[in-house]
Structures are given as structure tokens and as C-alpha cells.
Amino acid sequence: MSVAVIDLGTVTARLLILTPEGKRLTDRRFTRLGENLGQSGVLSAASLERVAEALDAFAAQIADANVGPESTFVVGTSAARDAANTHELAQLVSDRVGVPLEVLSGDDEGRYAFQGATRSHGHDGQYAMTLDIGGGSTEFVVGVVGGESIESYSADTGASRITDAYIVSDPPEPEDLSAGLSIVELHVIDARRAVANLAVVAESGPVIGLGARSRPPPLSTSA
């Protein structure tokens, strides 16, 4: 049975389709769902429109792969957690894909990232750490590879959130970078306090970093 998963992140929307034969179909669209969310508290009409276009493209690929709604899953992360109008996003998902939206907690997001990343890195029984830098949040996770022991801390800081809040010049001025870095440093301190073995595993490894691989294109002025 084939399975399709759509991940609606703060900056990107991603599609993964897996077939019983092990074939993978992936797609990614830059939707900037969380654009200016920190200032407005809501998902903008423009960002929801971009997500709708991505969902239409993904739904067509899911249909072409003969994946039914019972095997299709759509999850939302940081932006979906924080917005006051997440119900509008959920309605889009229902209308365009025909399945409910599941909003992941920060802990669940970190746990899934750890399990996926360590599947091909590290050895069962050893401690490992994953650092998942997203657009709206960053998950610090320490756990035993292949085991159930996982500790996580989800920080409300990410590439898009920091950029929107602190980077006001292009290129950034030193004071922009200092302001953003100071917030990141505070979250790292909180993560070290929240996850007991984080400092030890960070020193001994393996430490697996996760994040976007390319820079999104600039938005048009009409967006």
C-alpha cells in the first residue's frame, strides 16, 4: 500500500509518497506560511493562497500515484501551532486534499525528526542528538538510536521567525545579527536545562543537523 505525507512547515510545504516497492516521490514548494506571523498572530491571506496552490499540486500527484485518503496524512508544525486562524488552514487541507490536518506538538515534531534522521545514522543503542532548524521552531532532541528513550525541547526560534523579527537591513547590519543571535543563545541555554544529556551528547556525538537545503526565491511585491 502506498502512503502519502504532506508537511506544511513555516517556510516550505513538502510531499513524500512511498510505494510498497520502495519508490519515493518527493516535491517541495516555498509557501512562506508563517510570513509575518510573529507580528500579526495569524496566517495571511497571501500565505494561505500559496499553500492552496501547493496543496492542489500535491493532491494531483497523490491521485496519480493512486494513494487513497485513508493512506494520506497532512501535518502542520510551528506556524500551524501558533496561528490564531489555524482553522482556515485546516479547511484548506480538507477542501483540497480531502483529509484532516494534524497539528504536531513541538515534542512530536522533534521525536519524528529524531526517528527519521537516526534511521540511517548511528547505531542502535547509542545516544545521538538531532538539531532540527526549521522556519518557525528548532527542536533539540537527545535519545537512544532505535530505542524509546527520547528527550526533546522545542524552541520558538527558527530561520523565518528570526529574520522577520530582527533582520531589518539587506544585507543585515551587525546590530541585526547581534539581536537575532542573542535570542538564539537564550534558547540554547533553555535547551541545555530542559534536556539532561544534551551537553554531553553534543560533545560526544553523533549530532545530526536537519534543515532546508536551499534558499527560497524572493516573494513578488504582489504577494
Image: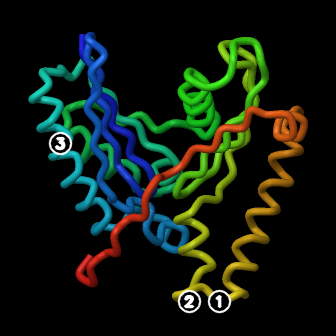
Per the image, the residue denoted by label 1 is 173
Are the residues at dot 2 and dot 1 in contact (C-beta closer than 8 Å)? yes
- Front disc: 2 or 3: 2
Q: Residue at x 63, y 79 (%)?
A: 166
First in sequence: mark 3 vs mark 1 = 3
In the rendered view of the protein, which quadrant contains the C terminus?
A: bottom left
The foreground one among 81 and 115 is 115
Are the residues flagged by discs 3 and 1 in contact, CB closer than 8 Å?
A: no
Residue 183, placed above or below residue 114: below
Seen in the image, is 80 located left or right of residue 53? right
Q: Judge by depth and name the residue closer to the eye, 35 or 171.
A: 171
Q: CA distance from mark 2 to mark 1?
A: 6 Å
Q: If the image is split into quadrants, where does the N terminus sit? A: top left
Q: Residue at x 86, y 45 (%)?
A: 192
The quarter of the picture where residue 46 lies is bottom left
In the visual, does 79 lie left or right of 130? left
Residue 38's mark? none
**Label 2 environment density (alpha carbons within 10 Å; few <14, some 14–19, many ≥20):** few
Which numbered tag is attached to residue 169? 2
Left or right: 135 in relation to 42: right
Q: Amino acid at mark 1?
A: Glu
- Closest to the observer, 190 or 142: 142
Amino acid tagged 2: Ser
Q: Residue 172: image x %, image y %?
A: 60, 85
Q: Give the x, y percent position of residue 111.
A: 62, 29
In what element is the residue under mark 3? helix
Q: Secondary structure at mark 2?
A: loop
Q: Which residue is mark 3?
A: 96
Taking the spot 71% from the left edge, 42% from the top edge, the residue there is 140
